[in-house]
Image (cartoon, rainbow, N blue to C red):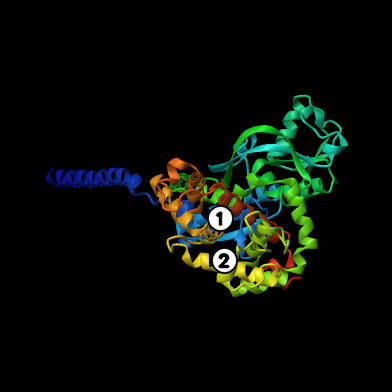
Amino acid sequence: MDKYLKLSVVIFFAISFFVFGWLSHTAYNPIHRIKAPSVLDEIKEKKLLNVVLLNSPSTYYLGSDGPKGFEYDLLDAYSKHLGVDLNITMVNTTKEALEFSKKSNIHIISASLAKTKIKEKNFNFGPSYFEAQQQVVCYRGMLWQGHFPKSIEDLAGLKIVVGEDTSYSETIGLLREDGFDINATYTSEYSTEELLAKVATNEIDCTIADSNIYALNQRYFPKIALAFSVSNREQLAWILAADSKELKDDMYSWINGFNQSGEMARLKDHYYSFALFFDYYNTKTFYDRIKTRLPKYKEFFQKYGEKYDIPCSVLAAQSYQESHWNPNAKSYTGVRGLMMLTLSTAEQLGVKNRLDPEQSIEGGAKHLNQMLKLVPEEVVGEDRLKFALAAYNIGLGHIFDAQILAERMGLNKNVWSDLKKAIPLLAQKKYYKTLKHGYARGSEPVKYVDSIYDYKDILQKNSYEPFLSKEEKSKI
């Protein structure tokens, strides 16, 4: 009997230990189950952010001094936040960009994509970073021909082409469903910018483009014109990899901070501020004078741009803003020559004849270089050149006054996008009477800098030979 009792006790304890172990494992395992790495974890581990970028002025392009584009700069800032490198795959059309959404190794697709209801059903969008509106853009010559469209009804009979698989093709489809007669075709061969170029040459009557894309391209294609808007304001966003919640959450947090810090406003100002000052006739004249006047002086812009460490495209653009490349230019205040130097400034710079093109250009470059050296060291990057150009126009003392005013307003006095909000106030007595250098026409230097950057960008975008990088020149 004792034998069976002992055996029963052993069996009881054995079963008890088994049950206890099983229960413990069951309770313990969900807590300590190994979690698969997220998309964000993989990005940080490999230190690589794989992005698809549309090759266009609004997104990504190679400028004379490296990669450019609003969305590229934004992605570059985000990659720095993550502490990783950008691995860029370049595409030429929206349709081509969207095809990469099927690839598991792609983290972000950036192509000025609108968060439409149709696309949101099919793609995983991240946070919005820009707001735009779809606009019908047509050949400017139709204005004088008498059949420039003013409404959707006026599109009947016109030749319209838009990109395939874009928000524009979605809009055309919806308009047709509503009964509008629109002779539109879709293409996967051409980008929106290429279609704008075809409108400019009257190969097609009209296309549709987002307002930001039109704003960037109107100076490159002066013969295009805005007809009317065809959508409400839409949010632009990147498409993210599927199942990337952690990446999306991190991106929302980052972009919120990017906005609050003022960096987003600064970036938008850099790429889009000049659009406010576009003038068709002035731009058309500029294109004409690139061919007729600039060749006479290009070697001087190159020579003294290099000597005084000023980008020659900026120097040429500044000269055009000053004198329209007229060596005999004279203002009512007595400034003269290609760089519109005052007599006293010319004497200080050693310029004996302000009407001599070479002397004027060297004097202007030297003077701008002096301004650059006097810009406070807290001003960094390209903002230094913008501060210097503004000082060339209005005087360094007024720039210092504007910095004081910006600080009083709670703005960053060392950032151009903030300073340009303060400078115009120098024309108001309640502000300038409290500052050392008094009254100034504060709106002028803001327009001055924006116009110069507009002209500079046209020179670079049109690959005018003197203003290309050494790598680009080697390809000519």
**Residue that carries the numbered disc 1 in the rendered image:** 73
Tell me if I can see residue 471 in this picture: no
In the depicted structure, whether residue 25 falls above or below residue 291? above
Q: Position of residue 246 (x, y in %)?
A: 45, 47
Q: How many C-alpha atoms fall within 10 Å of the one at disc 2: few (<14), some, or many (≥20)?
A: some
Q: Nearer the viewer, residue 189 or 336?
A: 336
Residue 298, percent from left and from top? 72, 69
Find the distance from the CA under tag 2 to the CA under tag 1: 38 Å
Q: Work out whether mark 2 precedes mark 1 in sequence or the reverse, and give the earlier one.
A: 1
Question: Whole-percent x and y of residue 240?
Answer: 55, 47
**Mark 2 residue type:** Thr
Secondary structure under the numbered disc 2 in the rendered image = helix
Instruction: Report if residue 447 is visible in the image.
Output: yes
- Residue tagged 2: 345
Q: Say which of 377 and 346 sits in front.
A: 346
| Left or right relative to 164: residue 442 | left
Classify 10 Å Cα crowding around label 1: few (below 14), some (14-19), many (20 and above): some
Q: Give the camera-side residue of 251 and 404.
A: 404
Left or right of 256 in this view: 443: right
| Kind of residue sitting beneath label 1 | Asp
